[in-house]
Amino acid sequence: MPRPTKQSPERGNARIRLLEAARDIVRAKGFAATTVDDLCRSAELTKGAFFHHFGSKDALGVAAAEFWAETTTDFFEAAPYHDPADALERVLAYVAFRKAIIAGDLAELTCLVGTMAQEVYASSPDIRDACGRSIFGHAATLEADIEAARRDRGITGDWTAASLARHTQAVIQGGFVLAKAGNDPALARESLDHLDRYIRHLFHVVEEDAK
């Protein structure tokens, strides 16, 4: 998964270092198991520095979700799946891109906000809501292409562009869970293959190709 490529000077180097530490450690250990000491050790900062920037560990969790949203937005905006002229091809290219970046260590390929949302949805509503804004905000970036593809191909039905966009995220996040449970990133890539087939079916691509 993407990593920040630059720091935000207005936020201060120490704050960014703590957020980067949270991004990496929480994906590896989970939010509850991550301690302030873990974060300070990884960021090479004191607890005083931590509490200067964050009033609590939960405050850090909210900020980490927002930091993830900001940095991954830049990453996905620059990704090549936006290039095809055809709207459906852009949607399918997005799925292919998400599959392509599922590589390497499980902790590094999985989603910070998905990991935290599963763990703290009941115990920390503020973190849950910040994670939701990230996940649903990313899903929303797919809606225009899905709607254009529906219009271009005359697709009707009892589903919406927004619902399909959300479904892509359900498959991706579920794929990450399977990959962790099976200790095998290939399980997540397999889920993306099925998502590709499902989208093609919705848009009657198989039927058209068979003519």
Image (cartoon, rainbow, N blue to C red):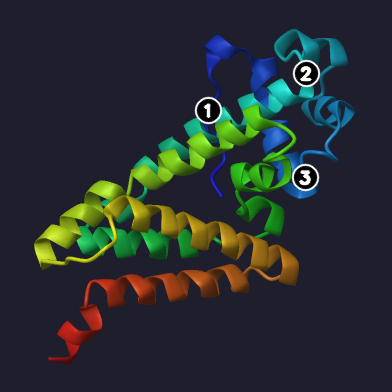
Q: Which mark is residue 6?
A: 1
* Res 109 → quadrant: bottom right
* Res 116 → quadrant: top right
Distance from disc 3 to disc 2, alpha carbons, whole Å, reads 17 Å
Dot 2 or dot 1: first in sequence order is 1
At 46% across and 59% down in the image, what residue appears? 98
**What's the amino acid at mark 1?**
Lys
Q: Is residue 3 left or right of residue 143?
A: right
Distance from disc 2 to disc 1, alpha carbons, whole Å, reads 25 Å
**What's the amino acid at mark 3?**
Gly
Which of the two discs, 2 and 1, sits closer to the camera?
Answer: 2
The residue furthest front is 158
Q: Which mark is residue 30?
A: 3
Position of residue 164 relative to residue 42, above or below, is below
Distance from disc 1 to disc 3, alpha carbons, whole Å, reads 25 Å
Give the SS element for disc 3: loop
Q: Residues within 10 Å of mark 3 (few under 14, many from 20)?
A: some
Dot 1 or dot 3: first in sequence order is 1
Q: Which mark is residue 56?
A: 2
At 17% across and 65% down in the image, what residue appears? 156
